[in-house]
Image: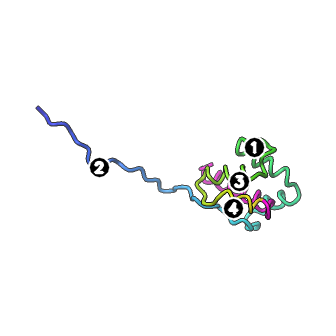
Amino acid sequence: MASPSVIIVQPQLTVANAPSNAWQTGLMDCCSDCGVCLCGTFCFCCLGCQVASDMNECCCCSESVAMRTLYRTRYGIPGSICSDFCTILWCPVCSLCQIKRDINRRKQMGIF
């Protein structure tokens, strides 16, 4: 009789291009995508609807703490609800632009 095989080491999954668990651009990094910043500055509601559409959410929720927190937790970006609230409160345009730039970058990398 043959003795049963015992697995000692399980195979590990390694991903060469793992998605970054940080924002792809800074909060005030407007020059990295001027089109997004111009849209956010002059047509904030339009940019909000684009972000909500990208995330399959209601257009009314796009500029909310919940939307930023949802996006941040979906991609494992460090932060807290308190930091999300403060960012939305003091820099709503920059916050929305940062999310849109991040979405665009993650789409280019194929991880959105």
Disc 4 versus disc 3: nearer the observer? 4
Quick check: marks 2 and 1 in contact, CB under 8 Å? no
- Dot placed on the residue nearer the N-terminal end, 4 or 1: 1
> Where in the figure is residue 3, as x and y percent of width and height?
15, 36
> Where in the figure is residue 109, as x and y percent of width and height?
60, 54
Disc 4 versus disc 1: nearer the observer? 4
Q: Which residues are magenta?
A: 89-112
Quick check: marks 2 and 3 in contact, CB under 8 Å? no
Q: Which residue is mark 2?
A: 9
Q: Amino acid at mark 2?
A: Val
Q: Which residue is mark 3?
A: 68
Q: Judge whether residue 103 is colored magenta.
A: yes
> Where in the figure is residue 68, as x and y percent of width and height?
71, 53
Q: Residue at x 75, y 46 (%)?
A: 52
For label 3, the SS is helix
> Where in the figure is residue 72, as x and y percent of width and height?
64, 54
For label 2, the SS is loop
Q: Residue at x 70, y 58 (%)?
A: 84
